[in-house]
Amino acid sequence: MEKKIMKGQWVEIEEILLRPEERTGNIPEETKKVPLMMRMKGFLTNDAEVGKRVEIRTLTGRIVSGDLRNASPTYEHGFGKIFIPEMLEIGISLRRLMEDEDDKR
Amino acid sequence: MTKDRSYASVMGRKNEIMKNALGIDYEKYELSKLSFDYEGLLEDVGYSLEEIIKIQEETAVGHTPLIELKNLSALSRKYAMKGYGGRIFIKDEAANPSGSFKDRRASLAVHQAKKLGYKGVITATSGNYGAAVASQAAKLGLKCIILQECFDSEGVGQPEILEKQRKCEALGAEVIQLSVGPELFYQFLLILEETGYFNASLYSSFGIKGVETLGYEIGKEVFEKFGKYPEAVMITHAGGGNVTGTARGLIEAGAKNTKIIGVSVDLKGLHMASDLDFNKKSFTTGHTGFGIPFSSYPDRSDVPRSAARPLRYMDDYYLVKQGEVFYMTEALAQLEGLERGPAGNTSLTAAFALAREMRDTDILVVQETEYTGAGKHPLAQLSFAKERGIEVKFGNPSDEIPGKNIILPENPEMIGLRPVDMEGLRQSLIKNAVEHRQINEVSELDIFYLMEETKGTYDSVLKTLQELGIPLIN
């Protein structure tokens, strides 16, 4: 069973703003066949489980409804998960080029 | 009474919503079916340049350092003929409160919102402008909502935009994140209507007048130090506000012969509204997806008449490749000790290539830097690209195909200048203007308007109109 998220917790919701058939005509096919989605954060107004329809109170005091996505969201972006040896190589080669320059002086 | 929230109905209320949210009646600037009074729109901001400088000083915006990039200039000179290799300077706009020149654009808009008694400000942007508006709103005690196009239909967010969300939230803003699509504008209108907040548009006259101080500072400082104005100012170009405001400020400072050069990252082939292409881009702004359409049709923006009109000012426009900008970002860090973000490094890349064609006494100014860090850094972007099957390798950047590969130059000499056909852009501006406004004939006034719009001659404008089958009626 999904854990209950308590009223007042900082959560993230997701909502469909436009279903595919409601989208504007002037967009590529791949965009047209998916809904326009929204995600936003706020304080949960009533106890609920993840996936349920809920309302949140946002930072500006608006009440917005959507599906509860998660509680206590954190920031997960960083500096990437794959090592990029090319970037290391650029620094080393540029410094070498400048050293050659110094030798000539 | 609850208003109809359907797409068609909300778009139909566009003009009314905009008027309430900006406090500007754009109709009074219309001169004919085609032309409008651009200078009048900008003058009505109602602040002199000196007053704008004061307003910005109150929130610690502006007066950023102008740094000579001696090592990068020397490196560029290695590949130049004797007597050539210009001096490259960079305006360290990352020193502004929220980390980019966008604070200049936001300062006047938020100041105006406060003055007019709005309780909050809203803007639609996936760029640094969100953080800038949030920062100014924090300082002036206004509420702030930012709408971002952020993730694709799989829910995967572009790392740079995720960082911009974090930054906006760090500065107290409410962030609404949307999936890919131009209907962001629909949601923007709905929220404006619901909240009654001020539209802190990037493209309002406030958004442009605020940037004039940037060009002004560059013109004045270079003149004071070197007794001349810069030969060229390099400006990363997307929606056109950076080019427009900077150029106007330079002219104000007396730098009338300084070349205004726009630079964008070449993302040709990737559709801006495509859910599939969205995360194949390693740059979220300063690219051709904005730069080209906003040059040739400025009024596609979120206000009835955009105050950002780059073709009025731009002398040349160059494209650089994603791999070149990542390379130059690393070069700036490794040779100049400046770790900065992608926006300014786009025009820096072109400056590095252009410097080789300029005399060694010439001065080129790259007019911005931006902050960097998680999500924005090349390591974050290149890792994200690799995860999505994009090949990253050394080679000739001219072979780079956006969305397929990112080609880092094998050596600095391979960084190239790819000029955009300015004449073609000017012609498409005229074509778009007459098409969107359903023009069948023009007057002398319209010809003069289009000359200003395109920095063109009477004959060139007339010729383009003739080719479009639009007669001149006296």
Image (tube, rainbow, N blue to C red):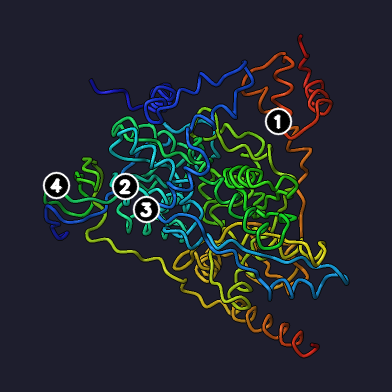
Q: Residues within 10 Å of mark 2 (few under 14, many from 20)?
A: some
> Label 1 vs label 3: CA separation?
35 Å
Q: Is residue B360 above or below residue B161?
A: below
Q: Secondary structure at mark 1?
A: helix
Residue B173 picture location, percent across and down: 32, 50
Residue A34 picture location, percent across and down: 44, 42
N-terminal-most mark, 2 or 3: 3
Residue furthest to the bottom in view is A103
Residue furthest to the right in view is B82
Residue depicted at 23% across the width and 20% down the height:
B1
Going by the numbered disc 3, the residue's amino acid type is Ser
Q: A10 and B354: which one is in front?
A: B354
Which of labels 2 and 3 is toward the front? 2
> Label 4 vs label 2: CA separation?
29 Å
Same chain for labels 2 and 3? Say yes or no: yes
Residue depicted at 23% across the width and 41% down the height:
A65
Task: Tell me, for residue A45, which label it has, or none.
Answer: 4
Dividing the picture into quadrants, the one containing residue B453 is: top right
Look at the image and tell me in which quarter the C terminus of chain B lies: top right
Circle 3 is placed at which residue position?
A: B135
Q: Secondary structure at mark 4?
A: loop
